[in-house]
Image (cartoon, grey):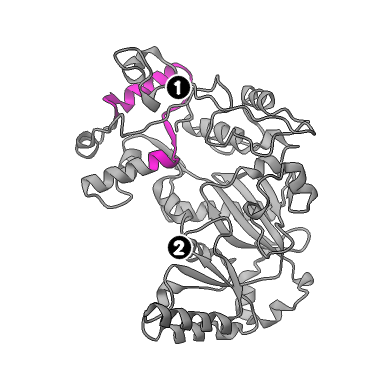
Amino acid sequence: MSVNRYNSESRNQLETEENGEPRGDMAATNTSVSRGGMNKRGGWNAKPTNRRKGVLEEHYWVNVLPIRKNPVNYQKLFQENELEFGGVNLEDINADLEAEGNGEMTIINSGPFKKAVRHDEEDLGLPYNTIMPQMVEAGLKIINPNNVISLSGDKAQQNRFFSDLGFVPHWAESDNYAHEGGIQELEDRLEPFEGVPIISKPKGKSGGDGIEFRYSDELIDDLEFEKERRGIEGALPGYIFQTTLPVEGDVRVIAFGDTPITGEVRYGRDDIDLHNLSQMDEEMDQFELVESGAADPVDIQKIDQAYVNATEDIHELMLDRGYIDGENTELFLGHDFLKVDPSKDEHNILDYYPDRALDNILVEDYKTEDGSYLVFAETNASPGYKIDMINYEYPNQHSALNLLKAADDFSKGVDFEPFKPGEVHEDDLEALSRRYPIK
């Protein structure tokens, strides 16, 4: 969706059909959101319907661009480097936006837009991630371009990518061993970590689904069994195997660009070794999540410098690798970090780690004031909305408010230095307060 408030009559050809009705989602539409009820303590209800990709209040205008209904002129795009949506040139759209005091057309790359672009790439016989870079070259600004979405959806790709920062646990991708003799190669790779529990994760799933903990000998035995049962030569494809660490919990930091905007500490359920709040009872409201010990809010104004360092380093790496450019493309991601305190290693797991591997994981730049080290877990382009429930005491750091404010600055070409978490549009904060009264 575009972040620009835009209801110009000059775009009537985009906004209406001949009968005067709105023309699908392309219109500068006032998209309403169902009201969430107050719970007994005066907070947001357990399942707030105002999600990050929704609209905070009826007055907030957004442009959703389904290119199925308002097709792109790809001949112009690739031959003349000009971008048209539904027959209207991007330069004209941006001129109207500027006349209204808005920035340039900026797309938050949510599911429908991403899928439409990929669909067109398939129809045109183009490689994946071909159209979106061409759109950017033609002047469109995009938050989370498709290459960022692809990275966030593949845990193995993430581990490989972020290993340059040094704080990724020892890991192996099962696909690399899915060949004859691969099981033995994997066993050899895990041998130095004998005694360390291994976590097995499906590469493309989220929310803790499909995660299992086993020791390396058990893992190898299971793979041998599955290999014979399925009649394959090596390890099962589609998984990563990672050495575990003694953790108190994990911290999710949602950031725009290199700026953390909100966070939460997640401990999860007592009866399982997963911190994902999606594993909790869906009916629990934010008070119950906090009071049960499943999660704690994070005052982003007092966030430890270690999280800022990690967020900035991730952003810089993405810039260096060309995933974004910081001027026409930017990030809105949730980063998950494990908190590892060697002094609280009750089961002596770290004693089984080779010194070289341990030195690579525990990085001084990512050491917090309380003596814990941050270790990379994963990054997510669609971080869950529960983080806003947990932080109900800090409405100014609501992820949607900060995303819209930061994206508004980005659309106007404002340097990110002036953007600070919590400095949101006052009318958006007022709208949020009316929709979900704070206790």
Would residue 357 be seen by someone viewing this image from the given angle?
yes
Q: Is residue 215 above or below residue 308?
A: below
The number of callouts visible is: 2
**Toward which corner of the image does residue 37 lie, by quadrant?**
top right
x then y, percent, for residue 208: 58, 59
Residue 197 x, y percent position in the rendering:
63, 77
Q: Quadrant of residue 82?
A: top left
Magenta stretch in the rendered image: 85-114
Which amino acid type is marked by label 1? Thr
Q: Which residue is mark 2?
A: 157
| Along the line of sight, the residue nearer the viewer: 32 or 298 | 32
Q: Considering only order in the chain, which callout, 2 or 1, is on the residue closer to the N terminus?
A: 1
Figure check: 243 above or below 291: below
Q: Residues within 10 Å of mark 1 (few under 14, many from 20)?
A: many
Crowding at dot 2, Cα within 10 Å, few <14 / some 14-19 / many 20+, comes out as some
Q: Position of residue 334 (x, y in %)?
A: 57, 49
Disc 1: which residue = 29
Residue located at (46% from left, 44% from top)? 144
Q: CA distance from mark 1 to mark 2?
A: 37 Å
